[in-house]
Image (cartoon, helix red, strand yellow):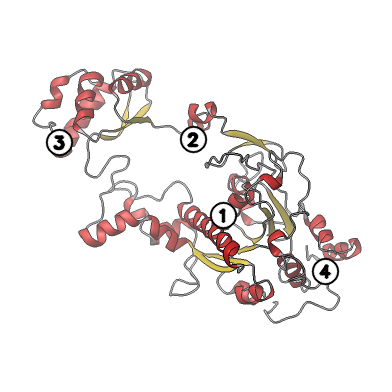
Amino acid sequence: MLSSHTPPPEDAPVPESTTGSRDAHSARSDAHPARADAHTPDEALPLSGITVVSLEQAVAAPFATRQLADLGARVIKVERPGTGDFARGYDTTVRGQSSHFVWINRNKESLTLDLKHPDAAAVMDALLAEADVFVQNLAPGAAERLGLGAERLRHRNPRLIHVSVSGYGAEGPYRDAKAYDALVQSEAGLVSVTGTEEFPAKTGISTADISAGMYAYSGILTALFRRERTGSGATLDVNLFDSLAEWMGYPLYYTRYGGTRPTRAGTSHAAIAPYGTFTCGDGRQVVLAIQNEREWQRFCATVLEDPQLATDPRFDRAAHRYAHRPELESLIEAAFAEMDVAECERRLGTAQVAHARQRDMTEVAEHPQLVARGRWQEVGTPEGPIEMLLPPVGMDGVDYRMDPVPAVGQHTEGLLAELGVPAPAVERLRADGAV
């Protein structure tokens, strides 16, 4: 294994570090491969000219770097030769490709590299010599053993922003614990407040990974902004547990200072009624969220067509409605059973009562709000085009990149040539299994 003090072999097929040979802020802005399918010229995007090298896999780190890539950063994704990021194999639902992988890896260039190969250090050093950001989510301590720790890399490139994403951080008793998303959701208490009292549940998405990815993304943007003022890079440490623990703020403080955790109530509310999911006569479901007396009165008069129910002593105020929730819900369910969802939503809309349609994922894909606003856009993948959602933040004058998802190692030859590696040396690296 390459140590942090091992120099590149004398016959390494890439040039030695050129740190300081040109301003790292503008590094490679002229080297971005031409993209005929780009929607906005790179120079018009907020992060154009920023180069990110990411030794990433799974969800958290790739989710962070995709946000940067969407905004014009050049993201070079370093993957294992052959298999690549193991998230490529999570499932085969998107034209034979992983739904996780295509979601968070558009706009990137894929370089395959065996980090344990003797020539890998020279390739990484050349890549990182003028990079703006380095993101890695190896196990704690692994980056340092490979010569990719923050101290060494920032000494060689003082403007570098070095980002480590881990499960529980670089210190503490959980430092080396496995940190899959469901496990972190359990440790951070999210499972304890999700589901019902009978059946606690994890969330249906990778919440811990996404929270860490978003904090890594915002941290990188902050570090880039500070670098504009100071000229210095930064060392960032982000982990799934701390990120999700921050998101647990309400139930965490509620429990710490109130003595008990919030009740698990499914789609219902721990203290408000009617609040939750109700089924209409056609089997479709709507979710109610009635939170004040005016709405309650309109709901009774217009939706249930029983205005006197609003003044029934069992239901005439919020506390009474919650105390008699089973009786109240039975009345609502009986009334909704006489309507299809269209009629129910018509009445709710007329009454201006807060509500939503409970949709499955097939319905969400065709959601009228997404369709009407053109949120789906075609993106290329190794197995053909797919439709993907545009990034959620609208910014005037910015048309986000929606470039292809790369195949494993798709850009290896081009990147090595860009680093000055001659074609025969590239062939030798391939033959040796280094790339």
- C-alpha span from label 1 to label 2: 24 Å
Give me the residue at 38% from left, 19% from top: 342
Q: Residue furthest right?
A: 424
| Mark earlier in primary sequence (1, 4) | 4
10 Å crowding of disc 2: few (<14), some (14-19), many (20+): few
Q: Residue furthest bottom?
A: 5
Callout 4: SS:
loop
- C-alpha span from label 2 to label 4: 48 Å
Are the two marked residues, 3 and 1, in contact with CB atoms closer than 8 angstroms? no
| Horizontal side of residue 319 vs 304, given as left or right | left
Amino acid bearing label 4: Val
- C-alpha span from label 3 to label 1: 46 Å
On screen, residue 287 above or below 223: above
Nearest the camera: 196 or 44?
44
Residue linked to disc 2: 361
Residue linked to disc 4: 14
Amino acid bearing label 3: His
- C-alpha span from label 1 to label 4: 29 Å
| Mark earlier in primary sequence (3, 1) | 1
The quadrant holding residue 173 is: bottom left
Are the two marked residues, 4 and 3, in contact with CB atoms closer than 8 angstroms? no
Callout 2: SS:
helix
Can you give x and y, in whole percent of width and height, for residue 91 in the image? 60, 46
| Mark earlier in primary sequence (4, 3) | 4
Residue linked to disc 1: 64
Amino acid bearing label 1: Ala
Can you give x and y, in whole percent of width and height, for residue 76 in the image? 70, 57
| Mark earlier in primary sequence (2, 4) | 4
- C-alpha span from label 3 to label 2: 33 Å
Residue linked to disc 3: 324
10 Å crowding of disc 1: few (<14), some (14-19), many (20+): many
Give me the residue at 84% from left, 79% from top: 10
